[in-house]
Amino acid sequence: MNPLGFAWRSLVRQPARASLGILGVAAVGALLFDMLLLSNGLLVSMRDIFDRAGFDLRVTATEALPGQGPRMQDATAAVDAIARLSNVRSVIAMRFAEALIETTATSRVRVSFQGVGGVGARPWDLVQGREAQGTRELLVNRDTAERLRLAPGSRVQVRASCSEEPESLPPAMFTVTGVADFPFDTSSSPTAVTTLEALGELCGLDAAGQADVIMVASREGATMAATAAQVSAAVPTLQVLTNEEMVGRIESGGFSYFRQISTVLTTVTLSFAVLLITVLLTVSVNQRLGEIAALRALGFTRGRVVADVLCESALIVGGGGLLSLPLGGLLAVGLDGILKNIPGIPEDVHFFVYQSRALGVHAGLLVATALAAALYPVRIVARLPIAATLRNEIVG
Amino acid sequence: MNIASRVNNAIIEAVNVSRVFPMPAGPVMAVDDITLRIEHGEHTSIRGPSGCGKSTLLHMLGCVDTPSSGTLLFNGADVATLSDRQRSLVRLRQVGFVFQRFFLLPMLTAAENVELPQAEAGVSKPDRRRRTKELLDYVGLGARAGHRPSELSGGEMQRVAIARALANRPRLLLADEPTGELDRSTGEQIAALLDRVNADGTALVIVTHDQTLAERSRRILTMRDGRIEREESR
Ligand SMILES: Nc1ncnc2c1ncn2[C@@H]1O[C@H](COP(=O)(O)OP(=O)(O)O)[C@@H](O)[C@H]1O
Ligand SMILES: [Mg+2]
C-alpha cells in the first residue's frame, strides 16, 4: 500500500476529523479564491469594457485620466490628422459636460452630457432610433429615456453646464433621435449625447473644437502598439494611452485598494487554514504514535512515514481545494451582487472576475498550505524515538 | 565480510553493550555492559523483574535503539556505522517484531496488515497475496483475512501480528511480552505458535516476566539491574 492509499485509509478511519479538515479547507479555499478574483477583477472587468467599446487608444491633453485633466483645444484638427493615418479605422472626439434636461417644468433630470464628433463607430450600442447628427439633436440612454418618457422625436429643453463654475447658459431645444446603451452605464446614471459642435455651441464660442478625449480604433490587422506609434507621431503634443496603459493608470490612481485588501485577507485566511490542518494532523499523529513507532520497528523508513503524513495533508487540502471552487464561485456571484449595489457603479463592471491566473495562484497557495501545515506533524514523525515510544505506549 | 562473521554463526552479537538514559535526576543505566550472541535458529528468553532493562536490550538487538557504548554487530556489520535508512532496511528484511500491544493498523484488514511490510520491501502483488494467505493459514486465521483488528480477539490480533512479523522471512523474531495482554490459555496458544515459528527455522528472542513462557526456551537469560545475572540452557 503506497503512502497515498495509506493516507486515504487513515482519513477514512476518522471520518469526522477528515470532514472537518476538508470542510475547513473548502471554506477557507472559497474565501481565498474570491480574494484572488477580487484582487484583479475590477481591472480585468474595466479592461474588458474598454476592449468591448471597440477603441484601442485614448488621446488626451495631459497624462491625467480622460475627463480629469485639461481639455484639448484643437480636437477637430487632431481628429482629422488621426483619421488620415493608415492604421486607423475610426476616431472620435468626446467632450464631457453636464446638463439639465426638461420636458415640462416638473419633469426634469440632470444628465451626464457628452459631445461626440469624428468618423466611424461609436462606443455605445444604439437600441432605438438613429444617431444624433444635426446641431440640435440628442441621443439618450435608457435611463434618461425611461425617466422622461422619451422616444425618437421627443422634444426637450437642455441647459448645459460646461465647467466646474456655476454658470447660467441659455437653454436650447433639442430633438431626441434615438436611445442607446453606454458601456459605463450604471443602473441609475442618466446620460445624453449630442454632436461635438452642438455641445461647443452650447458652451460658448471659445469652446468650439474642445474635447476631453479622442478615442481611436485600429484597422483589422494593425497592432495597438503600431497604431499608438502612428498617432503619437501625428499629434506629438498630445498623450496617447492604450487600453492596457489606461487600466494601469486607473490601478495606480487608487484602485489598488482591492489588491491590498485581498492580500491582507488572503494572508489571514491562509494562516487560518495552516493552523487548522496543523492541529488536525498533529492530533491524528499523536494518537497514532505507537502505530508509527511499530511501523518504524518493522522497517518503514523515516521518509516513508513522513510521506504518509504529507499525503494525508495533501488529501485534506486537495479535497477541500476542489470543493472550494464551486463554493467560491457561488460566493463570488453573491458578493459581486452586493458590491454592485454601491451607487454609481456601471452595470458592466464586475468586482469578481474569473481569471485562469487566479486559479493557478489558488492551486499554488493551497499546495503551499498543505506543505506548511504538514511541517510540524512531519517533524514529530521524523524525530520519533522508536524505542522510547514503544515503551511509553506500554508503560503509559 | 569481516572475519567475525565468517568465524561465528551469530545473527547478532552484542559486545560490552550499555545503554544509559540521561535523566534530570541523574543517568539511568538501563543496560549495563552486556555481551551476548544470538545464533541462527536459537530459542532464547530474557526474563527478569520489571525495569531491569529487558526491553531496552531487545530494542538494541532489533536495531531500533543504539548502545551508548559497546559494539553491536548484525551479521558481522557494526550497526553503529549504518545509516538510519540502512537500519530500517535491516529491520524490514531480517528482523521481525512482535509487541505486547500488537500495534496492528486498525484501518487495515488482517491480510492488509500482513501485506504491508511486504509491499514496503517491494514484493510484487501476486507474491504478496500468496505469501499473506500462506501466513494467515500458518497462524490459523485463513478464514479471517478480511477482518479488521477490531473484529478480532486479543489472541487473534497477536497471531496476525506474528504473521506480519514473519512476512519478509526474517532470520530473527523479537517478541516483547507477547502474551502480556492475553489470558493464560490464549497466551499458551501464542507461545505454542512461537515455538512452531522457531522450529521452522527462525531464531527467537522473547522478553517476558512470565515464568512458564520463559521456560519453554532452550536458553533462558535472567536480567537484574541492566545485567545478565544468570544464563541457563536446557
Ligand atoms: N526512553 C527512556 N528514557 C528514560 N528511561 C528509560 C527509557 N527506557 C527505559 N528507561 C529506563 O531503563 C530501565 C529499563 O527499562 P526497560 O528496558 O523498559 O525495562 P523492562 O523492559 O525490563 O521492564 C528502567 O529503569 C526505565 O525507567
Ligand atoms: Mg519492558
Image (tube, coloured by chain):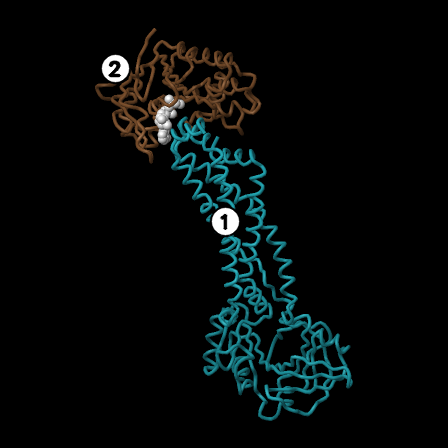
Chain colours: A cyan, B brown
Instruction: State the residue at coordinates (57%, 52%).
Output: A30
Q: x, y percentage for residue B96?
A: 40, 21
Q: Quadrant of ligand 2?
A: top left
* Res. A366 mark: 1
Residue lying furthest top: B234
Tell me the SS state at disc 2. loop
Circle 1 chain: A
Choose between B15 and B143: the one closer to the eye.
B15
Q: Chain of mark 2?
A: B
Which of labels 2 and 1 is toward the front?
2
Amino acid carrying label 2: it is Asn
In x, y percent, where is residue A252? 48, 70
Name the residue: 48% across, 44% down. Answer: A278
Query: x, y (%) of residue A65?
Result: 52, 77
Is residue A103 or residue A210 the one in the foreground? A103
Disc number for residue B8: 2
Q: Is mark 2 within 8 Å of ligand 1?
A: no
Q: Residues within 10 Å of mark 2 (few under 14, many from 20)?
A: few
Q: Quadrant of residue B149?
A: top right
Q: Please indicate whether residue B168 sits to the left or right of residue A167 in the image.
A: left
> Element type at marker 1?
helix
- Is B117 placed above or below A189 here? above
Of A221 and A360, nearer the camera is A360
Crowd tier of the residue under label 1, counting other residues whose Cα lies within 10 Å: few below 14, some 14–19, many 20 or above: many
Q: Is residue B167 above or below residue A8?
A: above
